[in-house]
Amino acid sequence: MAGKRRDKSRVKNLTDLYLSGNMEAQGPEAQQRFSQRSAQAQHRKMEQTALLRAAEEAEIGQTELLPTGEVVQVYSLFSDVEAGGVMRLCVVRKTMAKVAETSLVVGDHVRFRDIGSTDEQGRPEAVIERILPRTTVLTRADSFKGIEQQPIVANAEQMLIVLSLHEPEVRWGLVDRMIVAAQSGGLRPIVCLNKSDLAGRAGDDIESATEVLAHYVRLGIRCLESSITSGVGLNDLRDLLRNKTTVLAGHSGVGKSSLIMAIEPSLDLRIGAISGYTGKGRHTTSSARRYRLALGGLVIDTPGVKLFGLWGVTRENLPGYFPDVENSTAPQWRLESFDRIMKSLPREEH
């Protein structure tokens, strides 16, 4: 009822205004005033847009002048960034995080802005304003279905795939997946058979492993055997790591961290024991982290993996990563590995 009374009052007022002749007299003036206000509002909006664009262009120009650093480790919301020998605790600017194609990863080169404060450890704090283009990227899918990509490391040159015959036992299918992941990301794969001192327990397994490594060598993949106990292969490993950026990958418990500490004892890499109940390695590295070697070069330790979904690899381009299958020189284990990977892949590239 109250609504109806307001409507009648409004109609009466408009009628009185019309009958008095004021409506016609005031109409054009009111329209003119409205048009002026509209024009002024539009002009202000155009000015604001121009100012925002100018600010964005200025910010881009200023970003180019910002210092650069390299991501050493990424936590949930923060990251360690090294620049000029100084470690900074950084966060990613929210606006940049929203438009970035992938998340920040270890090895990324970034431009940052110091904010003039320090954390509880005395490290300078900064904001990452830009992620620079990557030269290489090691990426895996979130699952074998390949729904989303999970970049692991950026700008590395090679990938050291560490495996062992026992404790834990080698899975050649996983090794093949890692080789494909490295090659598809632009990294050079290197296969290292660690714990060669345990070969006596392996029986015929060592002969089979030697044949596998020989086949990889024929495919142009660098291979070596190593043992921390006997020192076998450590000098060769030093030569391979020197002045290179290398990603360490492999099953938990194969000895990735132990190998690096044998070469660089001063490094503080956590080493986990083997579970006596399952025979599987406990995960001691919770996220990828970069370490600097005294002999020159960088190593990036990554968490042990049990599965490795391939990203950007499809049924159409997989044969390019298995030239031995293409030219009919692949042994049976490689054919089986190829078939398993093929069945798990999508038909179209992401």
Image (cartoon, rainbow, N blue to C red):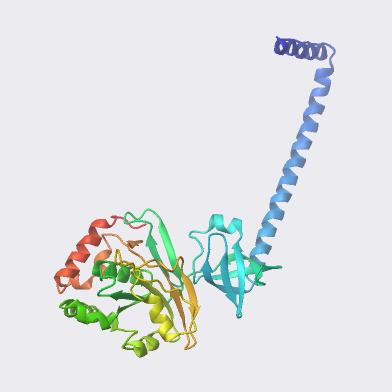
Residue located 43% across and 66% down the image: 152
Q: Position of residue 5 (x, y in %)?
A: 74, 10
| Location of residue 168 (image quadrant) | bottom left
Q: Farthest residue in the bottom direction? A: 235
Judge by depth and name the residue closer to the eye, 14 or 336: 336
| Location of residue 31 (image quadrant) | top right
Residue located 57% across and 71% down the image: 81
Judge by depth and name the residue closer to the eye, 74 or 113: 74
Q: Position of residue 33 (x, y in %)?
A: 80, 32
Q: Position of residue 299 (x, y in %)?
A: 45, 78
Q: Position of residue 222 (x, y in %)?
A: 30, 82
| Location of residue 261 (image quadrant) | bottom left
Residue located 15% across and 74% down the image: 329
On screen, residue 118 versus residue 92, left or right, reads: right
Residue 158 in sight: no
On screen, residue 308 versus residue 334, left or right, reads: right
Label total for image: 0
Residue 144 in sight: yes
Quarter of the image that includes the N terminus: top right
Quarter of the image that includes the C terminus: bottom left
On screen, residue 269 versus residue 235, left or right, reads: right
Judge by depth and name the residue closer to the eye, 225 or 231: 231
Residue located 49% across and 66% down the image: 105
Q: Farthest residue in the front direction? A: 276
